[in-house]
Image: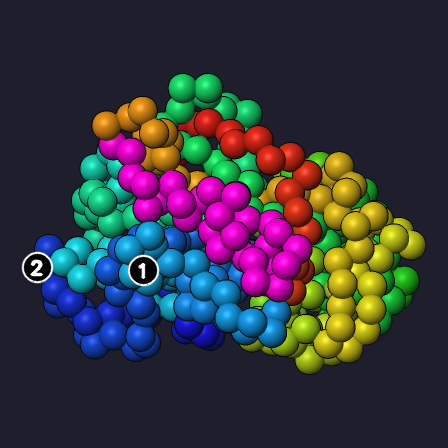
Amino acid sequence: MKSRKALALCAVVGVTIAGLALSAPANADPVSNSYVLVGSDTLQDAGNALANGTRVTGTRVRSVATDGSSIGSFDAFGSAAIQAKSTGVYFARPAGSGDGVKALSRSIDGAPFSVAGNTTPAISITGQVDIARSSSGPSAAAIDVNGQLAYVPFGRDALSYAYNGTGLDQLTGAQLKSIYECTLTTVNGVAVTPVLPQSGSGTAKFFLGAIGNPTLGSCVVPNVAENDGTVLNAPGKIVPFSVASWVAQKNGAAQNRTGTGTVLGSAQGATAPFTGSGSSLVPNSAYYSNGTWGRDTYVVVEFARINPVDPKFDAGLHALIDTTNTKSLTNFGASITTSGAVKTKFGFLAPSDPTVLRAKLS
């Protein structure tokens, strides 16, 4: 499924919800006959490739349910509402990691689900979401050894920033913090305009933490689609960007939406985020291993459904997140027939820590 970031989050869709008539759907999302993935844009392209099947490694690789049925991976952007399963309700599209984990949580506890800034009415979505894509782990406050959620490592990513123009190729965390506080407005003679992804973005959250949690100034342009360089439509504009997503787009593994005149800068001085050139980029492990700018990403599921001794155990879901299953979402094998090889083409390295984290519902 191709990304449709150009469509606004407020686009209307075709269904009647709680008595509110909405117009026809603007695009074709999947309707899953088994498991549903939603959430992070950063994991979206690799997740879509595995869900739909891909030959990016030269051989076809596809993650399917144990009964052979396909899984449905929903983009973070597109029409305002989605119908995840054929008998399910329409609900607000989860736009990013935070919304994805919330949707999974509401799918578990049955409380109404809604998304800030999305006019789709809040509605119960019990059983409609099975897996959330998350570009970051749970917060310290959410970690709970008895938590209902399980964060299973997906791959290693890193964060940097993209910019339009010249002269901004190396910026320190301190400089970036000042830029987003609007106290540093010119760098190397270039007037800078900071741009930030939508509030549910795990990339935005991680980036702000990496630069010291600035108090955002009034010059910041908010709520743009993440990992989309086309928002940098003037020299001096700068935005957080996943290195994995940049590599995937430039390599042709994902739709190239890096934009015209955009460059991926380095937040680690002379250490570049990637090596290679053209459509043969390779993640730079030295950049990815940095404790500030590197990050493990996750797929999130209900722990009870992957716990063999729990009455809710779901063997099919367990297989999809079993790292020993060569075509699971979490596998990181080297063979071209494995999901791990696919994720490498999409700019990910193996997770730095294979530990499954338990967390509270969001």
Q: Which of 357/16 is in front?
A: 357
x and y, in percent, of residue 225 in the image: 52, 63
Q: Which residue has dot 2 on it?
A: 19
Question: For the residue labelled by badge 2, is the local secondary structure a helix, a strand or a loop?
Answer: loop
For residue 247, side relative to residue 355 (left or right): right
Viewer can see residue 6? yes
**Residue positioned 59% across, 55% down in the render:** 340
Q: On the image, which quarter does residue 282 sit in?
A: bottom right
Query: In the image, which residues are magenta?
Result: 312-341
* Amino acid carrying mark 1 in the image: Gly
Q: Which residue has dot 1 on it?
A: 68
Question: Could you tell me how many numbered marks the image carries?
Answer: 2
Instruction: Indicate the quadrant containing the N terminus: top left, top right, bottom left or bottom right.
Output: bottom left
Q: Does the magenta stretch include residue 327?
A: yes
Q: In this view, does 14 lie above or below 51?
A: below
Mark 1, other Cα within 10 Å: few <14 / some 14–19 / many ≥20: few
Label whose residue precedes the other's in the sequence (2 or 1): 2
The colour mode here is rainbow
x and y, in percent, of residue 162 in the image: 71, 63
Viewer can see residue 84? no
* Amino acid carrying mark 2 in the image: Gly
By secondary structure, the bulk of the magenta-drawn segment is best described as: loop
